[in-house]
Image: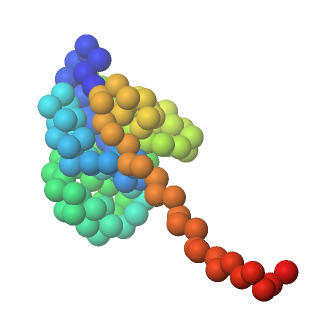
Amino acid sequence: MDGGGSSDMTLAFELESLKELANPEAVFSDARSWSEYVGVISEKPTYVVTNFTRKNRIRQDFFSGPRGRRESLESVKSQFQTERHVFIGTTDADKELAESVEWEFLPLETAAEAAGWELAEEEEPEEPEIERRDDWP
């Protein structure tokens, strides 16, 4: 996704945005090639983030831990002194959060398109087969 800018960047993914990717491990690996630090931010308990990252073989430089997303982004920004701090999310609330803590916001769809990341396909629920009877009106 390198848009010609500096690779001196801290990149944070909202956990829910990672769940919308077909291959989060490959995305993290790709992001690591053009970002200085890459991690995950979430309101979910630490074990939820840890389970997801282990399952997907994601090695993160930081995660939100037991604190909220706002506090996590503020903490990451103060600890990781890079030229840019970019937050990838999916909702208006994610965008508002990023702006409130002076991070750049990048919608997942925009990031995926620019970087060539594949989004997970939504599984359509199977409709149950309905038995048709000829002797019923």
Residue at x-position 33% and y-position 39%: 118
Whether residue 80 is visible, yes or no, is no
| Vertical comparison of 44 with 14: above or below | below
Number of callouts in the render? Answer: 0
Residue 91 rendering spot, x and y as whole percentages = 53, 43
Name the image quarter holding residue 73. top left
Q: How is the image coloured?
A: rainbow
Whether residue 124 is visible, yes or no, is yes
Outermost residue on the front side: it is: 134
- Side (left or right) of 13 relative to 9: right
Residue 132 rendering spot, x and y as whole percentages = 69, 78
Residue at x-position 31% and y-position 36%: 117
Which quadrant holds the C terminus? bottom right
Judging depth in this view, the residue of 94 and 22 nearest the camera is 22
Residue at x-position 51% and y-position 37%: 95
Residue 27 rendering spot, x and y as whole percentages = 24, 41
Outermost residue on the top side: it is: 4
